[in-house]
Image (cartoon, rainbow, N blue to C red):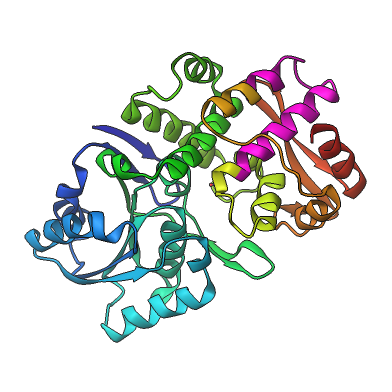
Amino acid sequence: MKTVHVPASAPYDVLIGPGLLSSLGSRVRDLCPKAGRYLLVTDDNVGPLWADACVKSLDAAGLAGDAYTLPHGEASKTAQSLVEILNFAAERRLTRSDMFIALGGGMTGDLTGFAAATYMRGVDYIQIPTTLLAAIDSSVGGKTAVDLPAGKNLMGAFWQPRLVLCDTETLSTLPETDFASGCAEVIKTAILFDEPLFAQLEREGRDFDREALIARCVEHKRDVVAEDEFDTGRRALLNLGHTLGHAVEAESGFALTHGQAVAVGTAVVCRAAAQYGVCPPDLPARVDALLEKFGLPIRTAYPLDILLERMLSDKKRAGAAVNVIVPEAIGRCGIRPMDRQALYDFMKAGL
Ligand code: GLY
């Protein structure tokens, strides 16, 4: 097992290794001795596979509770689901000393985290990520949210979990598209911070040691969160590929996964950066080749005019400008504010 400590305003550990679900109950007891009940939130794909193991462990530790199961997919990450979860908790009389547990991917983690942030003005929660994407990114750092019709993650809060328990056995049942989706965020992390990791992925492809790779990506995220927990500066780097990626994802009606859309967004900004002379000329070809090696898309056919409107409504706008993360080398990226015209020209250069 590997442990990564996250020194946020409310510090916590990320535990990564096989078989960790069986220790859930005793860890809840140690961390939250006053917790009497729990609410386990999951989805209809993950619940049938892993909820029983969680409940068994919680039972053995003398904790009682209930499970709330959502339909899988981004369409469930709504204000309506949030209210349903809060009502469910209130009807079962959970108190402020009880706890929420998120078992699933990014949708479940973001939604449950936000429910925990708002139930009775805030209760403890544990993240149990069961996708690669959630393990290396969304379960760590305390960003919680639901989507609004106007865009992704527009309603949310910073609320750090008490623990992230990443049982690597749960990743063994991941559908292929979800695994590839997580690989897009791994490649994003390597482009941002870690040239040796990028070179390793070029050499080894998917034959990586999952525990070691997740820990390494979480360490990078830990460093960013430690420096900029509330996303006022350096944390924006984590949005590499996301400005165009979110637009492509929304335009596809979420037919493309988040990771597939981020792959397209990352490939486009790398090609644009080379066109602008900001990064080495061979960088886009390396990035395109690696993304394709992992079965990820690198282009979009959606018209730029339509994508531009979506990018401009992204919540990450800073006033009149949109902050775009631009690769300068493998392992180093910069943050560049762009107005409407600059954004259009830049993305056009990379399409
Ligand atoms: N997923 C981006 C962040 O945590 O800031």
Q: Residue 237, can we see it?
A: no
Q: Quadrant of residue 171?
A: top left
User: Which residues make up the magenta segment?
Assistant: 261-287
The quarter of the image holding the N terminus is top left
Decide: is 208 above or below 243: above
Q: Main secondary structure of the magenta part?
A: helix
| For residue 125, above or below residue 183 | below
Q: Is residue 237 magenta?
A: no
Quadrant housing residue 273? top right
Question: Looking at the image, is 111 positioned above or below residue 181?
Answer: below
**How many marks can you see?**
0
Q: Is residue 341 above or below residue 110?
A: above
In the orientation shown, which residue stands out farthest toward the right? 341
Residue 350: x %, y % from top left: 80, 33
Q: Quadrant of the C terminus?
A: top right
Tell me residue 172's x, y (percent): 29, 39
Residue 265 painted magenta: yes
Judge from the rendering whether residue 168 lies leftward or rightward of residue 246; answer left or right. left
Instruction: State left or right for residue 250 relative to residue 61.
Output: right
Rendered image quadrant of residue 92:
bottom left
Residue for point 57% across, 23% down: 290
Q: Is residue 96 left or right of residue 108?
A: left
Query: Can residue 37 be seen in the rendering of this structure?
Result: yes
Residue at 47 percent across and 16 percent down: it is 200
What is the x, y in percent for residue 306? Answer: 81, 55
